[in-house]
Amino acid sequence: MAYTISKFIIGLTWVFIILNCFTELPEPFATSLYWTGIFFVVAHIIETLIFLPRIKHAGGSAFYHFIMLFVFGACHGLQLPKTAPTTNT
């Protein structure tokens, strides 16, 4: 539940950052969203590199996990498994 709320807030922030690229917002908001966007891009690239081992062990589409990690950051990365799933044979 906590990750759902966090992902919603982060997604809403991305919407405002992208909206700022295409429309003219009042000046204090435009500058703040500009710098927030730069911070988000840099921080989420770093998080993608940090969570790379978890992406490799997560299974499924690695591209999907990269996109989700870039958009939602650690909220998605902490939900990925730390190690590869074990199989009982």
Image (cartoon, rainbow, N blue to C red):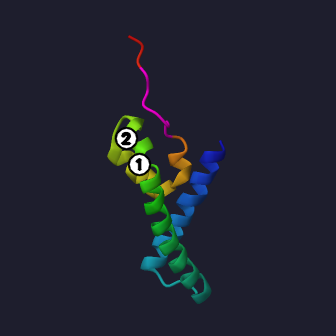
Is 85 in the magenta? Answer: yes
Question: How busy is the neighbourhood of tag 2: few (under 14 within 10 Å), some, or many (20 plus)?
Answer: some
Question: How busy is the neighbourhood of tag 1: few (under 14 within 10 Å), some, or many (20 plus)?
Answer: some
Q: Nearer the viewer, residue 56 or 24?
A: 56
Q: Nearer the viewer, residue 15 or 73?
A: 73
Q: Measuring 60% from the left and 58% from the top, which residue is drawn there?
A: 9
Q: Measuring 41% from the left and 48% from the top, which residue is drawn there?
A: 52
Per the image, label 2 sits on a secondary structure element best described as helix
Instruction: Measure the alpha-carbon separation of dots 1 and 2.
Output: 6 Å
Q: Quadrant of the C terminus?
A: top left
Q: Which mark is residue 56?
A: 2
Left or right of 34 in this view: 58: left
47 is higher (above) or lower (below) than 53 = below
* Residue 60, x across and y down, in percent: 35, 36
Would you say the magenta stretch is mainly helix, strand or loop?
loop
Q: Measuring 46% from the left and 68% from the top, which residue is drawn there?
A: 42
Left or right of 87 in this view: 28: right
* Residue 16, x across and y down, in percent: 53, 70
41 is higher (above) or lower (below) than 5 = below
Q: Nearer the viewer, residue 10 or 16?
A: 10
Which segment is the magenta one?
A: 80-86
Q: Which mark is residue 52?
A: 1
Name the residue at the top extreme. Answer: 89
* Residue 86, x across and y down, in percent: 43, 22
Q: Quadrant of the N terminus?
A: top right
| Residue type, mark 1 in image | Leu
Per the image, label 1 sits on a secondary structure element best described as helix
Is 82 in the magenta? Answer: yes
Cβ–Cβ under 8 Å for marks 1 and 2: yes
Name the residue at the bottom extreme. Answer: 27
| Residue type, mark 2 in image | Lys
Q: Measuring 53% from the left and 59% from the top, which residue is drawn there?
A: 11
